Image (cartoon, rainbow, N blue to C red):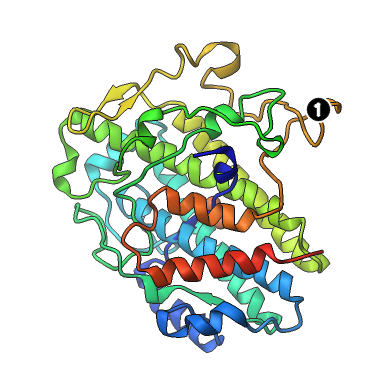
Amino acid sequence: MNAESVESSATVTRAPQAGATSRRAFLGSAGAVALGAGMLTGVSDAFGKGDLTEGDAAILRFLSAAEILETDLWQQYNELCGIQDAAVPGGSGNPAFAKIMATFDGDMAQYVHDNTHDEMTHFTFLNGYLKSRGADAVNLDAFRKLPSSTAKGAQKIGRLTNLMQLTMDTSWYTRYRASRKNPDLGATFPPAVPGLLKGEFPAIPRSDADLKPAKHLQAIANTAAFHFATIEQGGTSLYPSLAQRVKDPEVLKVVLSIGPTETMHFQTWSDLAGDSPPVKDPTNGLSFPDLNKPPFGGPNYQTNLIMPHPTTFLRPDLPVCSVIRPTNTKGAAMGAATFLTAMGLFKGQPPAFFAALKTLARQADAARR
Ligand SMILES: [Fe+2]
Ligand SMILES: [Fe+2]
């Protein structure tokens, strides 16, 4: 995958089952536009923008869709290795998976829970805000049909996202450690874990059979840790990229206030992904390298470098700067949709789903200041 397609990704989690009924009811009463196959035509060319500009409404709608998808995946993680409570209900935890995830950080379950809850509030707010401005909210419920993990602890419900066949680009790891190189200026970066690009790998136990052997479960846990950061670096780029096309100052405030929370997620996960122990999965050959040894490690690549390394920004003649990258705005929404699709996150979704996602992305990318 090239740097362009790496440039942005979105995060998404699903609505927890216990709250789903009321949330769906809310969206329905809000006049949400269902993106089901039967209504795609309406989504394609026209949507209610209320008193927003078409561009602002389209940007908010794409972000809402991204957050719904982000919620769906985070919810699956929370059911297995987070904290299931009133704020993030659903699932009952998978002791073996939760235990190995906690080896990355004793606070893992809390972090997974809070990230999940954040995403729920992101899409719920964005849809509520769209409605408050008279615009159409987004509803992807028609596509909640992908299978759940059958492992202990997971709800057996339809999902929007697939965490069991990921092909992951982990080049954010070297991108944020690079100096004098910026993807916005055409630079490309090698992945931290090349093996994750060479196959389809689960980031959650697909069933309780995945809980052993130990090295297999460790590889799944490592895949999850890298997936957390891979998703959140995408949101970290997506918001500032799209903010550059927003017109209304209040919409700008919304986008600029949500975006940095994605960055707070990303940095947390960047730290934890760096703690992934080297391991080779005996069942499929997936190999995680020692990230503190060549070609990584050393003063430029050591695993505790979790702040953005200052790099070229805007033009090579300017002083280096510690910045989020990429933040090029052209095609940012489609870049995010492409990145998530290439990751295998939607494997199993019907063509209508991809058509809806592309339509939302194209409309967002058409926004002009
Ligand atoms: Fe989010
Ligand atoms: Fe996020």
Q: Is residue 43 left or right of residue 87?
A: right
Q: Point out the residue furthest to the right here.
A: 318
- Identify the element where label 1 is drawn: loop
User: Which residue is under mark 1?
Assistant: 316
Please tell me whether residue 10 is drawn above or below residue 18 in the rendered image: above
Q: Quadrant of residue 147?
A: bottom left
Could you tell me which residue is drawn at 44 percent across and 54 percent down? 341
To which quarter of the image does residue 90 belong? bottom left
Expressed as whole percent of the image width and height from the top left, the position of residue 30 reads 56, 85
**238 over 277 or under it: above or below:** below
Q: Is residue 114 visible?
A: no
| Residue 259 in the image, given as x and y percentages of width and height | 66, 52
Task: Give the quadrant of the C terminus.
Answer: bottom right
Q: Nearer the viewer, residue 84 or 34?
A: 34
Q: Residue at x 79, y 67 (%)?
A: 250
Res 283 visible: yes
**Is residue 241 found left or right of 291 in the rendered image?**
right
Badge 1 density bin: few <14, some 14–19, many ≥20, Cα 10 Å: few
